[in-house]
Structure formats: structure tokens, C-alpha cells
Image (cartoon, helix red, strand yellow):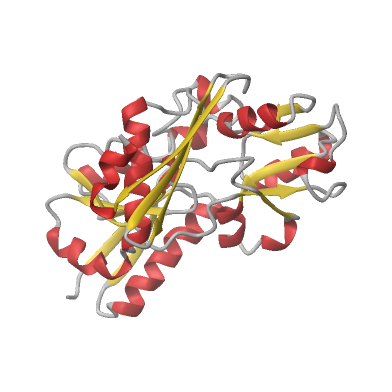
Amino acid sequence: MPREIKIGTRGSALALAQANWVAAQISGRHPACRVELVIIKTTGDKIQDVPLAQIGGKGLFIKEIEEALLAGQVDLAVHSLKDMPAEVPEGLILGAVPPREDCRDAFISSRYASLAEIPAGGRVGTGSLRRRVQLLHRRPDLEVVPLRGNVDTRLKKMATLGLDALILAAAGLNRLGLAHIYRGCVPESDMLPAVGQGALGLEVRAADHDLQELLSFLDDPPTRLAVTAERAFLARLEGGCVVPVAALGRVEGDRLVLSALISDLEGRRVLREQRSAPLAEAASLGT
């Protein structure tokens, strides 16, 4: 099935690593296809000095790429699934969801081996409202310092601001070959991940059936089922980056188990629940 495939992606090191991985998979499976990366700057890339929750949150890192996809300027968009709003725009679909990377949050510190070791008054950096509230719920004695930017930027800020620790997604660090920089992962019991964290979303035009078929080998049913439940939960709550929500789905035998969380903005009141359902009911479980 020879064809040209233009992949729309952000220009960050992580986005390029993810897009290049997808391109390599396609080229390996379909050598007759010519795959090209098209870098698109998004609103989230342009605004680096304001917390995501203050500028609209979800969709900031994908809107311009989706517009290029709808306009036919690119054929495929590779997103970190956690950046995608719960609703996919009309005319687009999730063409494939590859196997998930580690979904947990990584703990980075030159001083301490875990969150538990940080003394009262310690300072922890994160750009995520979800991480902030779960940190404060467990450790109200810590100061959470808002941080934005790519991995290098955050690591530099950690040093210049004298932070005791940094929390970043393990998946991104692993994909960048930086697994060696973190001490370990925060247990899911202490910090439930973001909806879709660790997963990639391959978005295509709904009418491009040939490309959907071409990409089908990359789709991982257990990952798709898990994120379907997580995203249905997000959709029901109408949550973006302005509401602290978290969810994690897992296939266990013939059932899907979903853990989910919502919190107030300071982590004082955290509601967490776990339920399960047959695999065919992934969306209704999330809802």
C-alpha cells in the first residue's frame, strides 16, 4: 500500500521521539510508504510562563495539529494521549493506540530517595494540578512549586530554584532515554496518573480508511480499552486542566478495572473510587 504519510507533531524532544518511533514502525511494516514529519507549533508551546490551568488546559498542545489534519496538510497526528481532550473533533478519530509505556509519575531528586524522605517544608516542583493536589493530600507540609517547560528546562529550574525534588511522567523520560535520572516512581496508591498518561494517540481523519487499516498493526486492544474507560470518565466530568482528575484503567482477565480520582484545588478533599466491568463496557464504566 504505497503512499506518502505526513505526520504532524510538536517540535519538543519528546514529541519528536514519539513521532519518529511511529514513523519507524510504519516504515518497518510498510516499506513502500514514504513517511515525513511536519513540525507544528502549538499554543501550549508558545506560552511557557503561565500555568496550564490558567490558559485553558486540555487541547493546548494539539489544537493546531488537529486543524492541520482536518485541512489535509498532514495525514496523521501523534499525540501524548494525556494532552488530548476527552472529545475528538468531528471528522477525526483515534486511529490507533499503541502499547502503553510506564503510566506512573517519576521521582527526581539528588537529595532524597523518595517523597517520604523529604522533610517538612521541602519544596517539590511540578507543572501539574493533578500532581499538586495529590502531593498536598499526602504531604500538606510540603511546598509545591509550579514548573513548566521541557525536561531540560525543568531540571535547570530545579537546580536554580533549589528544589528538593521534581515529579515528571516516567513515560516521557523513558522515551527520551533518561530513565537513569529518576530514583523511582511514586506508587499509584499515592499518585494516580493522568488520564491517558504513558499512552500515545494516533489521530487520523475519519474518512481516511486506508490509513486506518495501515495503522491497525499499532493498535493495542488492552491499552485502548483502558484509555477508553479513562477518557469516558474525563468526558463525564467535563474535566480539562482546570479540574484535578486522575484515572487508570487495567485489563485483568475478562474485566476492566478502573481507579479514578477527583479533588478540590488544594488536595484537602480527595474522592477516589475503584470499580470493574466486563471489557465490552469500558466506556460505560468510565461514565
Spot occupied by residue 224 in the image (x, y as percentages of width and height): 33, 55
Q: Quadrant of the C terminus?
A: top left
Q: Quadrant of residue 209?
A: bottom left
Whether residue 13 is visible here, answered yes or no, is: yes
Residue 66 shown left or right of residue 244 in the figure? left
Residue 106 shown left or right of residue 34 in the figure? right
Label tally: 0
Q: Residue at x 54, y 54 (%)?
A: 14
Nearest to the observer: residue 30 or residue 181: 181
Whether residue 71 is visible here, answered yes or no, is: no
Q: Does 57 sit above or below residue 231? A: above
Q: Quadrant of the N terminus?
A: bottom left
Q: Residue at x 28, y 54 (%)?
A: 279
Q: Residue at x 72, y 28 (%)?
A: 145
Spot occupied by residue 176 in the image (x, y as percentages of width and height): 59, 60
Spot occupied by residue 280 in the image (x, y as percentages of width and height): 23, 52
Q: Does 51 sit above or below residue 160? A: above
Q: Quadrant of residue 89?
A: top left
Spot occupied by residue 277 in the image (x, y as percentages of width and height): 31, 47
Q: Residue at x 21, y 43 (%)?
A: 70
Nearest to the observer: residue 108 or residue 153: 108
Residue 259 shown left or right of residue 2 in the figure? right
Nearest to the observer: residue 42 or residue 88: 88
